[in-house]
Image (cartoon, coloured by chain):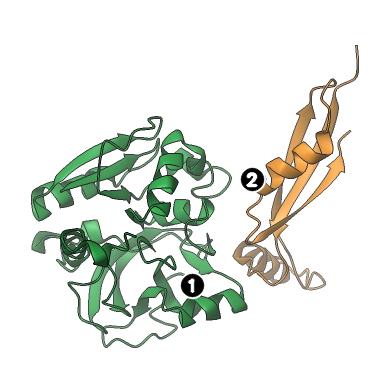
Amino acid sequence: MKFGVVTFPGSNCDYDAYAAVRHVLGEEVEFLWHRSSDLLGVEVVILPGGFSYGDYLRAGAIARFSPLMEEVVRFAHSGGVVIGICNGFQVLTEVGLLPGALIRNRHLRFSCRYVHLRVERNDTCFTSACEKGEVMKMPIAHGEGNYYNFDGDISRLEDAGQVVFRYVDRDGNATQEANPNGSIRNIAGIVNAEGNVLGMMPHPERAVEEILGSVDGLKVFESIRSALLTPNLAGRH
Amino acid sequence: MAITKKAVVFVSLKDGVLDPQGVTIQKALAQMGYEDFISVRSGRFFELEINPEATDVGRKIDEVCTKLLANPVIEKYRVEPGE
């Protein structure tokens, strides 16, 4: 099973994602250069964290025009599994694969710390190894992670069950204090309507070994692996 | 030779979208004693220098605004002729 990690100029979590897949999950993984138009036959695309194009204009705004992103959009539309982490989530909203936008953190500060997340659904190809309602611990590191969308669109998102992760306290309550950036309804991660594209601000790839402070992120990668081994779960049509 | 034309594009968050920068600037102004400025909305502008022989410039400006300069999900834009 082959994963692909996209490298844009300014990506800085590409090696973390690569290491998580190769050394911890134990699967094959390739770097995909943003100027290329070849996905090299990968079965999962990871858009990693970082500051693609220096976050110029808006986070993720320029990266979406990379030649490789055209292929990623095509791949996603044909049911391919795509996960965007942090800056990758921002790229996915800019390119229109996920609804809404990520704006400046409400308090204007860059937040770099551990947060707790509640798994809202475990019937997605990104969370099948988790329990529904499980509280996971992962780090965040962003200045523009404040998920925004208009009221009607948020209701549609909620009704369709597209909210996968929410910021909570350690007991699983989605309080205002547990919300690190001001995201509407404590939203930390969403999927598209088809369920094959996930965007999340927290970093699962930085929570895959005890020495990193948490192993909860590994469940996201294990879920993707089992989804690909059970193709009807991966949203392929 | 034709004179180069310019256009200025102003981009800001749509009404109703929280502008944390604007809020912070407004609070700073109030702290400085300028309490008359009860709201601040921030934004950015772009000066476009246009090839004098270009045609259909209005449409092209609208296109680049919606494709790149502004994110239509959260932002609005306004175009003015440049100096």
User: Residue at 26% of width from left, 88% of height from top?
Assistant: A171
- Does the rendering let one see residue A87? no
Which mark lies nearer to you, 2 or 1?
Answer: 2
Image location (x, y in percent) of residue A25: 11, 55
User: Residue at 49% of width from left, 48% of height from top?
Assistant: A60
Identify by letter the chain in orange: B
The residue indicated by pointer 1 is: A183
Amino acid carrying label 2: it is: Lys
Mark 1, chain letter? A
Quarter placement of the N terminus of chain B = top right
Mark 2, chain letter? B
- Does the rendering let one see residue A162? yes
Quarter placement of the C terminus of chain B = top right
Picture layout, residue A27 above or below residue B15: above
Image location (x, y in percent) of residue A41: 25, 39
The residue indicated by pointer 2 is: B67
As helix, strand or loop, the secondary structure at mark 1 comes to loop
